[in-house]
């Protein structure tokens, strides 16, 4: 039996067209997240709605746009929860593959003129998953840390303790 790899024109991933393209999309997402990290601290920590920003997905690009600005017809707005910061978007894009997958699907949509409704549904599902992972990052940021929870529990336990009872004291009943 022969090894099928010897018939393949690509013997390593540096020559695999699919891998190289996927890696270029990952670099696009990484450049997007690095750009977020270079922003002003106030912009990174305040909610996006304070600055009227929206997250847009287009062919080969992720971008923040002002909510009133127009972009290309082939771009999609990613719905984000109230209170989400641009750092939440960056963290979600780094941890989850949804941003890369959405960019890949948008490229397929651009290349095929006769895509189906199922394809558009898949694109909206991926966009929803990206939105969910951004919301999850915001929840992790906003949720109290374990030390804070322990401190609150200890304070509540102290409040629940009854004062010591003096056995010699008479109870007026």
Image: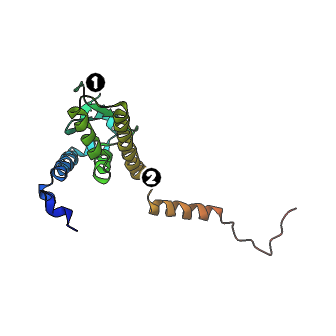
Whole-percent x, y for residue 56 in the image: 27, 34
Q: Which of label 1 and label 2 is nearer to you?
A: 1
Whole-percent x, y for residue 53 in the image: 29, 33
Can residue 49 be seen from the camera position used here?
A: yes
Q: Mark 1 highlights which residue?
A: 68
28 left or right of 80 in image: left
Residue sitting at the far right: 173
Residue sitting at the far bottom: 168
Quadrant assignment, res 78? top left
143 left or right of 156 in image: left
Q: Secondary structure at mark 2?
A: loop
Can residue 63 be seen from the camera position used here?
A: no
Residue drawn 32% across the image and 49% down it: 92
Residue drawn 37% across the image and 49% down it: 137
Q: Mark 2 highlights which residue?
A: 143
Whole-percent x, y for residue 82 in the image: 40, 37
């Amino acid at each position: 039996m022969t090894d099928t790899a010897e018939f393949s024109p690509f013997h390593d991933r540096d020559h695999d067209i699919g891998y190289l393209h996927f890696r270029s999309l990952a670099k696009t997402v990484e450049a997007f997240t690095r750009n977020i990290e270079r922003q002003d601290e106030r912009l990174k920590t305040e909610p996006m709605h304070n600055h009227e920003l929206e997250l847009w997905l287009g062919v080969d690009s992720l971008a923040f746009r002002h909510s009133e600005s127009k972009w290309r017809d082939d771009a999609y707005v990613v719905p984000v929860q109230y209170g989400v910061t641009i750092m939440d978007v960056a963290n979600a894009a780094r941890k989850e593959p949804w941003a890369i997958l959405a960019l890949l699907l948008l490229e397929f949509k651009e290349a095929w003129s006769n895509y189906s409704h199922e394809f558009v549904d898949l694109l909206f599902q991926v966009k929803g998953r990206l939105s969910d992972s951004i919301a999850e990052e915001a929840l992790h940021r906003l949720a109290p840390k374990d030390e804070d929870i322990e401190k609150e529990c200890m304070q509540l336990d102290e409040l629940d303790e009854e004062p010591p009872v003096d056995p010699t004291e008479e109870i007026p009943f």
